[in-house]
Amino acid sequence: MSERIPENVAEKLREIVVQHNELAAQLLDTEVLTDYRKVTSLSIKKAAIAPLVEQFSEYETALAQEQECEEVIKGDDQELAAMAKEELLELDKTLSVLTEQIQKQLVTADEQSVGSVILEVRAGVGGDEAVLWASDLEDMYKRYAGIRGWKIEDMGGSKTAILCIAGEGVWTNLGFESGTHQVKRVPETETQGRVHTSTATVAVLPEPEEIEVDLDPNDVKESITTSTGPGGQNVNKVATAVHLIHEPSGIEVRMQDTKSQAQNREKAWKLLRARLFEIQKAKIDAERAEARNSMIGSGSRAEKIRTYRYKDNLIVDHRISGNYNLGDVMSGNMQPMIDQLIEAETAQRLAEL
């Protein structure tokens, strides 16, 4: 007999079935249906676990059929017993495949349920070339998001590019991008043809719902100022820029992307919640996986996760084996590389079950 789903894992799956049914019920609620954002959020969460629920239902049906066949084999009817033995072999294969599929789905279910992320790209070492490199990375992510059909909202930023990207599977796929991206290429301003090394850091923050973040508005100091440009001069006579300070953590957010104070406030609070969520999530992850050595998906900005070699037209991701065509990836065709990262991470998590 092949491997079966352990009982503790089966209990978790039954909880997910209950969660799926609750989400389905909420999506039929007339009050919920009038709230577009709520419908989108619930639909993404339901879609994330729907395949898992369907496969577990198939698994339980096959398991019941297996038990029936075993009972028939114990009986006196030899002809039925022979048929049951043949069916048992097929059921064993089916259960083996379903067990593997379900466990893979289970370890990525939480990521699949996150339907929106905030992606920040910041220039690292390398002066002007680092700024250009950060801009190139931003364009790469926009192209990839476009290919995936995700919604992109540019939240502005002067020294840091900030994008809000929403869609099914967005955290599962982009969660691996956090870290330091190193580029080796000849800058446009280089007259001697020398290869320079520059970096940019990327942070991908799952955008949490308000209820998921431990945030007391009374802990936030908010001030409204006029927008400032290079050198600190005022570029607006009307006070529309929003400055938030979360006093317990010291996190600061400034937003002056639009001329609307209300829009800037909404974006600033959204970014503050995401940054605070990142800190809270990091503490929980550290407690759960203190001894874990895998670099994949840990999100530390200090890690050099990838090197982009323009001279060789290739990309090396330092967490997995294999090189990738630089031109393809920069044009947005990131999926083959990301699929390998997901596969490696899934294998790691399965080993920890």
Image (cartoon, rainbow, N blue to C red):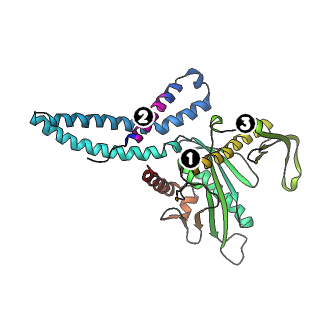
Please identify the quarter of the rendering in which residue 11 is found. top left
Residue that badge 2 annotates: 14
Looking at the picture, tell me which residue is in the foreground, 70 or 233.
70
* Label whose residue precedes the other's in the sequence (2 or 3): 2
Using residue 9 as the reference point, say whether residue 288 is left or right of it.
right
Mark pair 1, 2: CA separation: 24 Å
Q: How far across and how far down the image is residue 266, in percent?
A: 73, 37
Image coords of residue 83 (percent x, y): 15, 38
The residue sitting at 47% across, 38% down in the picture is: 49
Q: Residues within 10 Å of mark 3 (few under 14, many from 20)?
A: few
Most common SS among magenta residues: helix
Given contact means CB atoms under 8 Å apart, are the residues at marks 1 and 3 in contact? no
Which residue does the numbered mark 3 point to in the structure image? 216
Residue highlighted by disc 1: 171
Spatial separation of the CA atoms under disc 2 and disc 3: 34 Å
Q: Are marks 2 and 3 in contact (CB under 8 Å)?
A: no
What amino acid is found at the position of numbered circle 1 in the picture? Trp
Which region shows up in magenta?
Answer: 8-21
